[in-house]
Image: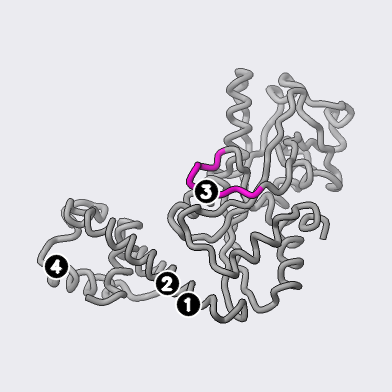
């Protein structure tokens, strides 16, 4: 039994598809197929039910996967601990951050951290808050900078900042003359929203349901620049965090008549081994005022 066989089996189990697993692992599909068949032969059991359209684990396969997940996680932690002896001369930190925060928060964080630890590599993954929390649970990320109100108890949370949700309207519109935006204003407007997977979108949808408003969504996008450009050209209004919307050309940011505040913080898995590189990043983020003012 080889380590790569276990890794191929784990990825195929997660994705329920050998082709996608091969693409994710950057190997050929036959390599994974052959490795899994050899693994089944060595174990003398069938790991997958191949009679279905989607690759499905057998009961024996499910039991085996649970043990493989633990074994590979322990092996990964062991390798990280060994690398700690290099005293931060090498290291990789994988961070997930929503697109809405990435353009504003991450450059400030990255530049400050790289100045202190130039030998450490930081890999950025832009996903919605919901997707990032799932990736943390699957050990695919070291950290996530997310809206923390929906974070599960399995994660450690380091608060960083609080932001207010604002309605972005064109400066040329009648709404721009208001100090606040009302429920009736929202109900009569076309909306531009973030794509699915954004926790901010979920917050907006929950608020609209609570005030019995059926939104007229005309467009959705995962790109903040695109959303702000659409608003500026009068396509519709959008809901963004205040630090993103402020100082935008041709856009006016209005607080809601019933304000919504969100807390943003650094999240990481409690059970996961914290490497020296990861601990250095946590320490750097412990003073959010200094981090965000860089």
Query: Is 76 positioned to the left or the right of 242 in the image?
Result: left
Q: Find the distance from the CA under tag 3 to the CA under tag 2.
A: 21 Å
Which one is earlier in the sequence, the residue at label 3 or at label 1?
1
Q: Find the distance from the CA under tag 3 to the CA under tag 4.
A: 35 Å
Mark 3 or mark 1: which is in front? 1
What residue does disc 3 label?
A: 155
Report crowding for label 1: few under 14, some 14 to 19, many 20 or more residues within 10 A (C-alpha): few
Which one is earlier in the sequence, the residue at label 4 or at label 2?
4
Using the rendered view, name the quadrant where residue 185 is placed. top right
Residue in the image at 69% along x and 51% along y: 101
> What SS does tag 2 mark?
helix
> What SS does tag 3 mark?
strand
Asked if the residues shown at circle 2 and circle 1 are in contact, with their CB atoms under 8 angstroms apart, the answer is yes
Residue in the image at 27% along x and 72% along y: 5
What residue does disc 4 label?
A: 43
Mark 3 or mark 4: which is in front? 3
Which one is earlier in the sequence, the residue at label 3 or at label 4?
4
Q: Quadrant of the C terminus?
A: bottom right
């Amino acid at each position: 039994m080889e380590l790569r066989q276990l890794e191929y089996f784990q990825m195929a189990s997660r994705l329920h598809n050998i082709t996608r697993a091969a693409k994710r692992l950057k190997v050929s599909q036959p390599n994974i197929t052959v490795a899994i068949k050899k693994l089944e032969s060595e174990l003398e059991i069938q790991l997958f039910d191949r009679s279905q359209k989607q690759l499905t684990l057998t009961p024996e396969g499910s039991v085996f996967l649970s043990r493989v997940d633990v074994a590979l996680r322990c092996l990964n932690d062991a390798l990280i601990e060994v690398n700690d002896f290099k005293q931060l001369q090498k290291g990789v930190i994988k961070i997930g951050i929503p697109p809405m925060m990435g353009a504003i928060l991450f450059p400030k964080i990255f530049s400050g951290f790289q100045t202190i630890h130039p030998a450490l590599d930081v890999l950025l993954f832009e996903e919605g808050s919901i997707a990032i929390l799932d990736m943390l649970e699957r050990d695919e990320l070291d950290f996530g900078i997310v809206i923390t109100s929906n974070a599960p108890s399995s994660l450690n949370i380091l608060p960083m900042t609080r932001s207010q949700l604002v309605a972005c309207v064109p400066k040329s519109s009648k709404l721009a003359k208001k100090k606040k935006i009302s429920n009736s204003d929202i109900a009569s407007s076309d909306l531009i929203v973030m794509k699915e997977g954004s926790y901010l979108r979920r917050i907006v949808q929950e608020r609209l349901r609570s005030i019995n408003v059926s939104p007229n969504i005309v467009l959705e996008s995962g790109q903040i620049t695109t959303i702000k450009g659409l608003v500026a050209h009068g396509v519709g209004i959008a809901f963004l965090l205040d630090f993103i919307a402020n100082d935008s050309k041709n856009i006016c940011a209005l607080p809601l008549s019933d304000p919504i505040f969100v807390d943003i913080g650094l999240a990481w898995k409690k059970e996961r081994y914290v490497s020296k590189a990861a601990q250095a990043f946590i320490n750097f983020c412990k003073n959010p005022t200094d981090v965000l003012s860089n």
